[in-house]
Image (cartoon, rainbow, N blue to C red):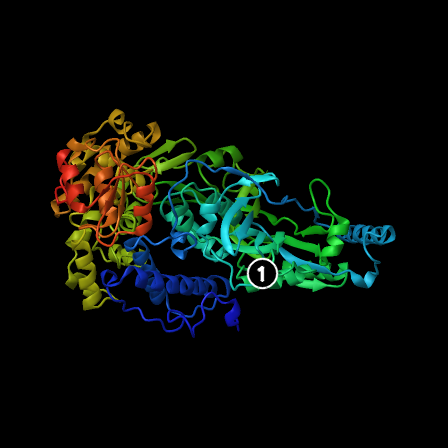
Amino acid sequence: MTTSSTRHADPDENPYVEDPPTDFEPVGDLSEDEAAEQAALLRAAVREHDHRYYVEAHPLIADEAYDALFSRLSDLEAAFDLPTAGSPTRRVGGEPLDELATVEHVAPMLSIDNDTEAAAVREFDERVRDGLAAAAESGDISGFAAADLAYVCEPKFDGLSVEVVYEDGEYVRAATRGDGREGDDVTAQVRTVGSVPGRLRGADHPERLVVRGEAYMPRDAFEAYNEALIERGEEPFANPRNAAAGTLRQLDPSVVAERPLDVFFFDVLAWESGDDGPDRPDRHRDALTAFESFGLPRNDRVAVVDDIEGAIDYRDEILAARDDLNYAVDGVVIKVDALVHREALGSTSRAPRWAFAYKFPPRTATTTVEGVTVQVGRTGRLTPVAELDPVDVGGVTVSRATLHNPAEIEALGVNVGDRVRIYRAGDVIPYVPEVVEKRSEGTYAFPDACPVCGAEVERDGPLAFCTGGLGCPAQLERAVEHWARRDALDVEGLGPERVEQLREAGLVESLPDLYDLTADDLAALEGWGETSAANLVAELDATRNPPLDDFLAGLGIPDVGATTARALAAQFGSLDALLDADEGALREVDDVGPEVAASIRTFFDREENRAAIAGLRERGVEPESIDADDGDALDGLTFVFTGSLSTTRGEAQAHVEARGANATSSVSGNTDYLVAGENPGRSKRDDAAAEDVPVLDEAAFADLLADRGVSWPPDESD
């Protein structure tokens, strides 16, 4: 049981830890002091719940209760402009970055010598013992006996190594390993990872703590995430390591927040105690115990052994358990336990002399290709899969392996009947790296027609796509799922299983068919009741006049996500204007280059997609237009909003941005106006005074917009 001294929040003092109340009084009824006090309790409670969920895997409350606490904290911070530095709400992401800055590490992040042979591990042990004996002889350490040496053994995670810095217990920075001396600054990205505490637990921690960890994607989460990518017609990650590395290097932290990353911490890079902080532990095993008290997640498969044979046995145990672990490992790391021994052994320019990685052998096998299946994703992308004579690869029977795309098939020269090598990349997705024996004539002929709907197949570089669009059943099912996503039309109750059920029942054979559904139709299906049926019909009815950007995002146009959809909506103002825009006009939109413009134009030119859009409009689904005539009416102005307005802050920002203005979250010397609604935050007003930025109440803001021909508040025509 975790003691109260190392908790983020004590249930005896914080009402939001155990059985928390979620029926909150209106935000507007609170004073600023009351809001600040409640927010402080909620921050501590949310940190505690994050730790129990992500680190200890023993949540105290249900997801619904957690969501209510998190939402209340977000509302308080927004309404009263409370400081969010270190707040759990910052995990949801932040402003996208232009690029990743390079930062110097606090201490070098060195490589580790490695080998797959036990003989090399025993040689490492001999070097350690000889080095410590020499250090004792020279007086660098006070004597050395064989019994003094112990090793700590840990799984070698196959992820991305990161440096994380805490000062006075607060998370301040994270960086990738890079070249060991410098790495990419991923502070905003790592902040979104649920298992990384924004504040260390308890009060007894170093003044400055720099730790090394491994960012990884759990195997079950990786498989689910890859499945979702494939369903959307996107390129899946080859292995969990690529997934972790690719995620952390995303420039948009909100993208990182949506992906299932985790971190294990396994070493101290710097420990500065300060006047009252604890001293650094003398042994590595005790440092890992300290990690637990700080709330830093560490792996539970660590073992301490007295000799190198124990370390070799440990490696064999982890190898045998490899397939049962929920994270990818490619070996074990053997470390000298005592800090004084580590310091005596020192390091070379590239690796410490006190650590060694005993790696696993590669996981490969040879088998025969018995067939090739071509799958169709949401965007129409065709993905070939090799059907194999089942073969054991590292203890797992493999009967299918990805061939990635037509260009990969051509590069391999593979065909049905060939003997191929199978490699289990990252312990998860098998793929074919080479043909080892050619037993067929020629190369597999990729189909010219979609295997599902028979439409023509088009090549785009190394990839192939079905041109059937929304008329292809395989694409339709995924298109409906995409339409219902939160970042599109946000239709609750329309998940993958229900979409499949509706299609199989013949109720949804095209996207417009969704709006023909009746509660009676749905209630007649297995697993539906009158309430759930009525709720889905109501959800769909509520999307008949969606914002133009949501409508565009819901269509699933290749290369058009929520951000590009907003830019298109702001530029063209109406669906009809966009439907008629040529590639030249599309390329005038920010972030729309030649390839994206061609992709948009191709999507709208296809008969099946035009028919689906027309069908939606016939059923009363008409996206709201934006008055594009005043698209530059506020050009050059920068606004910051605080307090409660007659519309939401997000709608206010979108309203001015659609007319050429910038809307930022903090006041600076570049800000033209701070717009203050009811209960405005004090810090933004103070910043405005310091920067000599005019402060407008909502009436003055409306007058300013009116002078430029822009209405306020936004009405339905906006």
Q: Nearer the viewer, residue 417 or 141?
A: 141
Q: Residue furthest right?
A: 137
Q: Position of residue 454 (x, y in %)?
A: 30, 40
Q: Residue furthest top?
A: 584
Image position of 252 (left or right of 244): left
Element at label 1 = helix
Q: At x 48% / y 49%, what residue is drawn?
A: 190
Image position of 147 (left or right of 79): right
Q: Nearer the viewer, residue 275 or 617?
A: 275
Total numbered labels placed on residues in the image:
1
Please name the amino acid that badge 1 sits on: Phe
Q: Which residue is mark 1?
A: 291
Q: At x 22% / y 55%, what residue is drawn?
A: 506
Q: Is residue 76 visible?
A: yes
The residue carrying pointer 1 sits among few (fewer than 14), some (14 to 19) or many (20 or more) residues within 10 Å by Cα, namely: many
Quarter of the image where the C terminus is located: top left
Q: Position of residue 337 (x, y in %)?
A: 71, 58
Image position of 172 (left or right of 555): right
In the depicted structure, whether residue 145 falls above or below residue 186:
below
Q: Position of residue 423 (x, y in %)?
A: 57, 46
Q: Quadrant of residue 667?
A: top left
Q: Position of residue 552 (x, y in %)?
A: 24, 41
Q: Nearer the viewer, residue 334 or 541?
A: 334
In the depicted structure, whether residue 689 falls above or below residue 81:
above
Q: At x 41% / y 57%, what residue is drawn?
A: 88
Q: Nearer the viewer, residue 93 or 456?
A: 93
Q: Is residue 624 visible?
A: no
